């Protein structure tokens, strides 16, 4: 029986550099806080051009694994970091815009994540985090607050509760999912017939959620979080934006 040959997969040079760096991270040889050697030293060691090395470093910076400081001095160069929130949020927002996920998918993901976040926060949230959440609720109650400012504080409130839950991955995913629909939620708020009444109703939920978390009423906080999310976000799924 004749052998069937298949073309070998070719990798671009910067992908080989990425693979080399990833292998060292997986092996524990590179950890958060470690600095990579300068480009002029690392490129020849890896046997690649400095342009290929820079392309690989840019990819790592985009996905939140590396931060690069140009120039000279003790802070210059590339350093391994743990910063998944912004990178994951940006990636999810792009995929959502491209239609990789439907509004309904995002809604159900938010419900699952935030039910878990509020339930865990009611059991584990530090007092300092709840005090910070209180200040956000107070900010959303300020007379004359605009839609954009409210939406920003609203996002920070939900992300803060997720972080206070004690689960870093839940926090990151909650932040990414909430950020992915921020523009749509902003447009929905701007289209409200009575913005003042809408803001008061939404913030009444925030105040009630915070009270439940402070009282340690985990199940009640989870249930209200779901009703709160299905309220405004649910109208997005049912409305024209769902198409």
Image (spheres, rainbow, N blue to C red):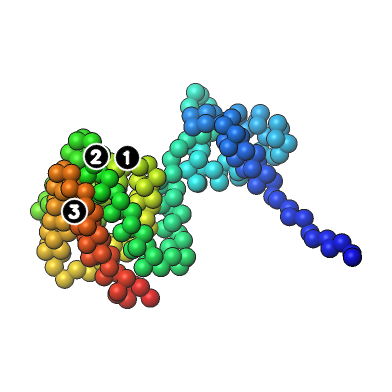
Q: Is residue 132 above or below residue 33?
A: below
Which residue shows up at 21% across the image and 48% down it? 218
| Position of residue 61 measured from the top left corner of the image (x, y, whole percent) | 51, 42
Under tag 1, what secondary structure?
Answer: loop
Circles 1 and 3: CB distance less than 8 Å? no
The residue to which callout 3 is attached is 220
Q: Residues within 10 Å of mark 2 (few under 14, many from 20)?
A: many
- Residue reaching furthest right? 1
> In this image, 167 relative to 204: left or right?
right
| Front-most of residues 176 and 208 | 208
> In this image, 91 relative to 60: left or right?
left
N-terminal label among 1 and 3: 1
Which residue shows up at 35% across the image and 50% down it? 175
Task: Report how far apart the C-alphas of labels 2 and 3 lie in the structure.
Answer: 16 Å
Circles 1 and 2: CB distance less than 8 Å? yes
The residue to which callout 1 is attached is 166
Task: Report how far apart the C-alphas of labels 1 and 2 lie in the structure.
Answer: 7 Å
Q: Residues within 10 Å of mark 1 (few under 14, many from 20)?
A: some
The residue to which callout 2 is attached is 125
């Amino acid at each position: 029986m004749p052998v069937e040959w298949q073309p070998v997969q070719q990798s671009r040079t910067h992908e080989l550099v990425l693979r080399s760096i990833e292998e060292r991270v997986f092996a524990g040889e590179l950890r958060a806080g470690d600095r990579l050697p300068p480009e002029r030293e690392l490129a020849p060691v890896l046997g690649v051009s400095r342009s290929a090395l820079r392309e690989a470093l840019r990819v790592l910076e985009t996905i939140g694994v590396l931060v690069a400081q140009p120039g000279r001095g003790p802070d210059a160069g590339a350093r391994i970091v743990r910063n998944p929130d912004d990178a994951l949020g940006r990636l999810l927002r792009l995929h959502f815009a491209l239609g990789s996920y439907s509004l309904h998918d995002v809604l159900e993901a938010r419900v699952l994540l935030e039910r878990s976040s509020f339930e865990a926060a009611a059991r584990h949230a530090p007092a300092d985090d709840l005090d910070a959440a209180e200040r956000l609720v107070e900010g959303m109650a300020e007379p004359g607050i605009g839609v954009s400012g409210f939406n920003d504080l609203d996002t920070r409130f939900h992300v803060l509760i997720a972080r206070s839950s004690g689960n870093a991955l839940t926090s990151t995913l909650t932040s990414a999912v909430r950020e992915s629909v921020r523009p749509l939620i902003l447009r929905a708020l701007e289209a409200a017939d009575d913005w003042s009444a809408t803001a008061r109703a939404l913030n009444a939920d925030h105040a009630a959620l915070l009270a439940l978390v402070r009282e340690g009423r985990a199940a009640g906080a989870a249930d209200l979080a779901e009703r709160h999310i299905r309220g405004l976000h649910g109208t997005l799924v049912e409305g024209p934006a769902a198409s």
